[in-house]
Image: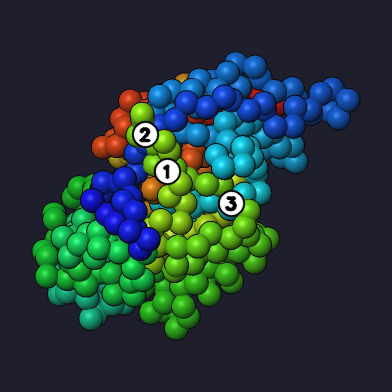
Amino acid sequence: MLTRARGRRLRTGLSASVLAAALGVLLHPAQAAGDPGPADGGPRHDKDLQQQLDRLVAQDDGPPGVIAVLTRADRTQVYTSGVGDIATGRPPQPDDHMRIASIAKAFTGAVALQLVDQGRLSLDDSIGERLPDQPTAWHAVTLRQLLQHTSGLPDFSAAPEFLEILRADPRHVFDPRRLLDFVAGEPLLFRPGSLYEYSNSDNIAVALMAEAVTGSRYEDLLRDLVYRPLGLRRTSLPLGYRLPQPYLHGYDVLPPAEPEDISEAVGVSGVWASGGIVSTPIELGAFIRAYGGPALLSEKTRKEQLSFRPGDSSEPAGPGTNAAGLGIFQYTTRCGVLYGHTGNFPGYTQLAATTPDGTRSLTFTINTQTSKSNKPALLARLRTVQEDFACALLKGR
């Protein structure tokens, strides 16, 4: 178990990705946000979709709140249920800051693939060529394999020494550029390119390769290649545990205990380029439309990005049938295909997805964590609801 700096116990276990949070609370659902009617030309809220969010929040182990944002061209619909802050009863808001967890890996992809477009990186560049100080056993691993999680790199976030530090101090400030040191003595898990295994180490290596070829800090590359071009003013990569105000509070939920606010219980320096980014539902939608659509990359590089491996899932799995591309996943639902990414972190579970043409997007956030190893039944229910929202996005006018 972990202890807070204040001495109070933090009711979280540890997962391979860092910490697995679990709690649950029964809350009265809030009304859907902003129900536009015919007078403003916008579509009405779908009552069935709203009821699905309400039922998700009402589950014993469900999230205190949920927010789903559907954007079609210049029209945006916001659905909410429950609360974004139990203490005040404030509902989730589309401009709330939140931890986007492993969707940060898509941002890593956006940086790396733009450097490929610029000719500063190649998808066939290897760790040995760009990061020669990394273990010799890893030198044959390529950028392509890192982006598609077929590298075989051992996951630093599952390393006993890393977890021991985190147990002792969940807010410990790691040197993010030394995270791979925790597994530097480990061999590859398999021959690069032969298998798929989701690993936080992959995106740390990608960020380090980007720094190596540019001489710039990864945080500056995010600013110059992603935030500024896309007008993302509320998106950042902090190293501490604080969240900018206002923020969607994340909770550990374990009935019958009261939910515990763990929004700032864990520092993010230990996930960095693999999961540390903070954004908002609105800005996350703008990002995924650009990255998953044709706006950000050249046609040649995008073709490589969208070379999918069937059956390989994001973590947690997204709606429908999953397939892994380069820093992006394909979600084939009963209503059509979306490109995107998911993520989970103590207090948060995320989905961001877009239509292939980049004109429509869905962001779906719950403020508790679920994954295949943490509340799998909740994850199964969540994926069902997400697919229904995906269908509304794809079919709606």
Furthest residue to the bottom? Answer: 215
Disc 3 target residue: 247
Work out whether 339 lies above or below 167.
above
Please identify, in this view, whether the residue under mark 3 or under mark 2 is nearer the observer: 2
Assign a secondary structure to mark 1.
strand
In the rendered image, residue 119, in percent from the top left (x then y), is placed at: 47, 72
Assign a secondary structure to mark 3.
loop
Count every numbered label the image shows and give the total: 3
Task: Name the mark on residue 124.
Answer: none
Disc 1 target residue: 260
* Display coloring: rainbow
Disc 3 crowd rating (10 Å Cα; few below 14, some 14-19, many 20+) is many
The C terminus lies in which quarter of the figure? top right
Determine the image quadrant of residue 227: bottom right
Does residue 309 appear to the left or right of 64 in the view shown?
A: left
Q: Who is closer to the viewer here, 259 or 216?
A: 259
Q: Residue at x 24, y 80 (%)?
A: 132
CA gap between label 2 and label 1 equals 9 Å
Furthest residue to the right? Answer: 39
In the rendered image, residue 354, in percent from the top left (x then y), is placed at: 56, 40
Disc 2 target residue: 257
Disc 1 crowd rating (10 Å Cα; few below 14, some 14-19, many 20+) is many
Furthest residue to the front? Answer: 7
Dot placed on the residue nearer the N-terminal end, 1 or 3 = 3
CA gap between label 3 and label 2 equals 23 Å
Q: Who is closer to the viewer here, 129 or 287?
A: 287
Q: Residue at x 55, y 39 (%)?
A: 86
